[in-house]
Image (cartoon, rainbow, N blue to C red):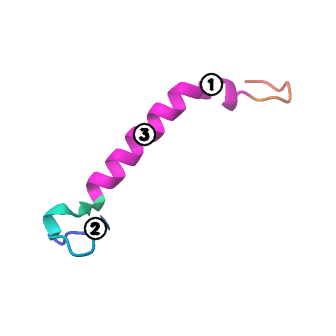
Amino acid sequence: MTKYYAHSLENMPEEKWQTLDIHLTEVADLAEKFAKAINPAIICRPSHGGVD
């Protein structure tokens, strides 16, 4: 399988580079933490007084 990299470091071996799958998983984890911290239920609630 082909490896894709999100980040590579100049003058560093590939073992030190961040693979795309790890990068995307870590970004998704951070997004989930941020979303929980700001309570998305309040943000997503309709403000126009319509039917939920």
Q: Secondary structure at mark 2?
A: strand
Kindly identify the amino acid type of the residue bearing the numbered disc 1: Ala
* Residue positioned 18% across, 62% down in the render: 16
Can you identify the residue that label 2 sits on?
5
- Segment colored magenta: 21-45
User: Quick one: 38 or 50, which is closer to the camera?
Assistant: 38
In this rendering, the label closer to the viewer, 1 or 3: 3
Q: Position of residue 42 (x, y in %)?
A: 68, 24
Q: Position of residue 24 (x, y in %)?
A: 35, 53
Q: CA distance from mark 1 to mark 2?
A: 34 Å
3 in relation to 23, above or below: below
Whether residue 41 appears in magenta in the rendering, the answer is yes
Residue 41: mark in rendering: 1
Question: In the rendered structure, which disc, 1 or 2, sits on the residue that comes first in sequence?
Answer: 2
* Residue positioned 51% across, 34% down in the render: 34
Residue 30: mark in rendering: 3
Badge 1 vs badge 3, beta-carbon distance below 8 Å:
no
32 in relation to 18, above or below: above
Kindly identify the amino acid type of the residue bearing the numbered disc 2: Tyr
